[in-house]
Image (spheres, helix red, strand yellow):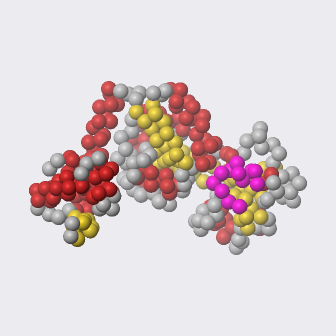
Amino acid sequence: MKLQQLRYIVEVANNDLNVSLTAEKLFTSQPGISKQIKLLEEELGVQIFTRMGKHLSEVTPVGAKIVAVAREILTKTQDIKIIAKEFSQPNQGSLTISTTNTQARYTLPAVIQQFMQKYPTISLHMEQNSSAQSLQSIRSGLADIAIITDLTELTDDMIALPCYHWNQSVIVMPDHPLAKNTLLTVDELANYPLVSYDFSNDSSDLQLAFTRAGKSPNIIFSTVDAELIKTYVRLGVGVGIVAKMAINSSTDHDFVTLNAGHIFPYSTTYIVFMRTLFLRRYMYDFINQFTPHLNQQTIDRLLLCEHNSEVLASFNGIKLPIK
């Protein structure tokens, strides 16, 4: 059994059993991959893939287990290289973060600036995605860390570490009828056109608040970009609902900002990564810069929890910061 054979069966599985595409991605030949897979099957005495003619058709039940173990072995071999690099080149490497527009724009700039000053030789990348896309990025190895709010697609092969809570605010222009409101209600919001984040998810905090009040929100414009929301509120299109962290007292002084903490429940931002990720020292430092209560000792302790429910339970009674 060779590591190359294990790499071939994993990559073939990753590419929907398309051997030609796998060969192209691995810069090798299709016959070479097919031969090595056949040799591995003969050595093990089982079929990893079933075939229709010359083509692979599906992964066998035992093959699925073999591919899963092979994936773990390949991850561990990569970890060996990373461990060696941690000692031989402690300040060289890369960090890829997948996050939402709000986090990328309002909470990460100062952290990233501080990190780059401390680690100028680390290659830092950031991609903006939805929460679900960010989780998929870390699952596929395209990103190391996800910084998100929605954990709907979270699985127990990932760990989610709570960072802070944040609230929504309602913004209107000074001449709007709601501008002098001291205690806003869902009933009142339902009377006006709204400009906000995507309400299409029935489980979103915004949608749930209206559903519980027996109302339907009149969303006339939705976007992931809080700055666009503010632009359309300024144009008089509607009442804006944005993350409180997106309101800048210096540049947004033309708005009247109304508290909505009693209407919409607070949201929580999490740092998520695969449990198999080997955390390098600079990764621990990045997490700690973003979330001071998550130091290396705390992270290592939380990694001992088998399920994310245990991780979250360990934060019961701990007052997270609010942004």
In reply to whether residue 183 is colored magenta, the answer given is no
Q: Which residues are magenta?
A: 221-232
Residue for point 40% across, 29% down = 92
* Residue 266 x %, y %: 63, 54
- On screen, residue 8 versus residue 227, left or right, reads left
Q: Is residue 95 visible?
A: yes
127 on left or right of 27: right
Left or right, residue 35 beside residue 195: left
Quadrant including the C terminus: top right
Q: Position of residue 9 (x, y in %)?
A: 24, 55
- Whether residue 229 appears in magenta in the rendering, the answer is yes
The residue depicted at 81 percent of the width and 49 percent of the height is 256
Q: Quarter of the image holding residue 206? A: bottom right
Residue located farthest toward the bottom when viewing the structure as drawn: 214
**Considering depth in this image, is 257 or 315 the residue closer to the camera?**
257
Q: How far across and how far down the image is residue 307, in percent? A: 40, 55
